[in-house]
Image (spheres, rainbow, N blue to C red):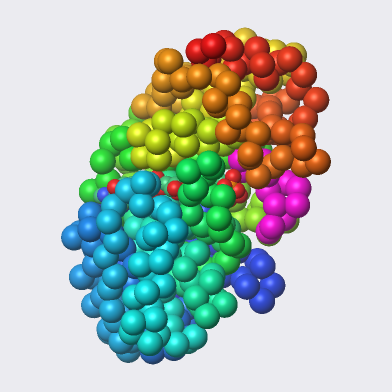
Amino acid sequence: MSDLPAESRLRVELDSRAYDILIGPGLIGQAASYDGAIRGRQVLIVTNDTVGLHYREPVEAALRDAGHDVDTLILPDGESHKNLTTLDTIAEHLLDNAYGRDTTIVALGGGVIGDLAGFAAAIYQRGIDFVQVPTTLLAQVDSSVGGKTGVNHRLGKNMIGAFHQPKRVLADVDVLTTLPAREFAAGMAEVIKYGLIRDAGFFDWLEANMAGINARDPALIIEIIRRSCANKAEVVVADEREAGERALLNLGHTFGHALEAELGYGAWLHGEAVAAGMCMAADTSRRLGWLSEDQVTRIEAVLAAAGLPIAPPSGTSAARIFDLMRRDKKVSAGALRLVLLKDIGNAVIYEDYGVALDDTLHHYLAA
Ligand SMILES: NC(=O)c1ccc[n+]([C@@H]2O[C@H](COP(=O)([O-])OP(=O)(O)OC[C@H]3O[C@@H](n4cnc5c(N)ncnc54)[C@H](O)[C@@H]3O)[C@@H](O)[C@H]2O)c1
Ligand SMILES: O=C(O)C(=O)C[C@@H](O)[C@H](O)[C@H](O)COP(=O)(O)O
Ligand SMILES: [Zn+2]
């Protein structure tokens, strides 16, 4: 690990659960990347049929080089499989093979695999170690960091889950070369989110560099992952279990999660739903007098430049979306709390939005 450049390593300073995020090329296939992150001999790689085809072999080889016994479980691909049935498949595999408490799960894939495998690690024999090897942009900038794990329910997104921090995050930028453009764009929604909630300078930088990012300039990609992870790590360290500030990472998600559930998990990608949701949150913020028309236009323009939707699909029912939003995890004492923008780079959690939310829902959605 010491031969890696310093700028590709960040630390999530969570006391006894502190861990490193390594960002750079060629990480997944090097035994050294896993040094110190895996306690026991047994390792179960959890991946899916798409990612497994590309990256199973180099990860297995590196872990064997590092002295581990390695087994791989291949799950079906897709958000529609992020559920309790697939979780049971992982639990059954662990039990069938008599895996002990010193087993480490390596989650090799995007956010779906990371959330599923992480949740299995959180609950198997009351908790075993896991390492995140995120292979989508979204997973490298967001889902692999911070320890939120879980599965979806018909009535709500990520409704069954646990906080369980990984032992390491290996964000290997080489794997992004096989990532389809639509998935890359979905990751950009979460990147833009950090600019909107707490890093106005990053938002300006993204506006200026979107052409190079879309062309996947390697230096720009490392920079967006590094800056996104640094922002996320700061928030998580301040509020690991979302008692307050961490909820800001949910900008656009109250709308977005409702859209994902209503449209059917997988119809719209998470990042796409969040992009539309951030535009809806910006619209409510404008109605409250916080954002100007110009700022809303800038937000829409940067999302559109990244190849993202800036509104939900036409025909979606406002009443059904509102019904799903009422089950959001940020509901407190029966009140739905929204993440809104006082300014670009300054998000707040707010429940006194009055008719502004209704007006937003009726502006974007069908009666
Ligand atoms: N835990 C968190 O903090 C957190 C944060 C954000 C999102 N999420 C969750 O993450 C999920 C979305 O994650 P995602 O966008 O990574 O989707 P995903 O995991 O479904 O991956 C997207 C697609 O890309 C494929 N893929 C992955 N890596 C690839 C690669 N390198 N080359 C080619 N194909 C590749 C996958 O097989 C899949 O088909 C959602 O369920 C969302 O709720 C969780
Ligand atoms: O890490 C967080 O905290 C986030 O909110 C990150 C989000 O991008 C992510 O989609 C998360 O899974 C949403 O959390 P949830 O608690 O609303 O399900
Ligand atoms: Zn998200």
Percent across and percent down for residue 354 are: 77, 19
Q: Is residue 254 visible?
A: yes
Question: In percent of the image, x 23 and y 54: which residue is there?
Answer: 50
> Front-most of 69 and 323?
323
Which percent across, then down, holds residue 263?
41, 31
Q: Is residue 141 above or below residue 300?
A: below
Where in the figure is residue 143, as x and y percent of width and height? 49, 52
Question: What residue is at 59 percent from the left and 17 percent from the top?
Answer: 361
Residue 221 left/right relative to 261: left
Residue 356 drawn at (x, y percent): 71, 16
| Position above or below: 358 against 70 | above
Nearest to the observer: residue 198 or residue 151 = 151
Residue under the image location 52 percent in, 80 percent down: 125
Is the residue 364 above or below the residue 246 in the image? above
Give the tally of numbered discs.
0
Q: Which residues are magenta?
A: 239-250
Q: Residue at x 34, y 75 (%)?
A: 93
Residue 171 visible in this rendered orientation of the protein: no
Which quadrant, please, contains the N terminus? Answer: bottom left
Location of the C terminus by quadrant is: top right
Q: Is residue 176 above or below residue 97?
A: above
Confirm whether the magenta stretch covers residue 29. Answer: no
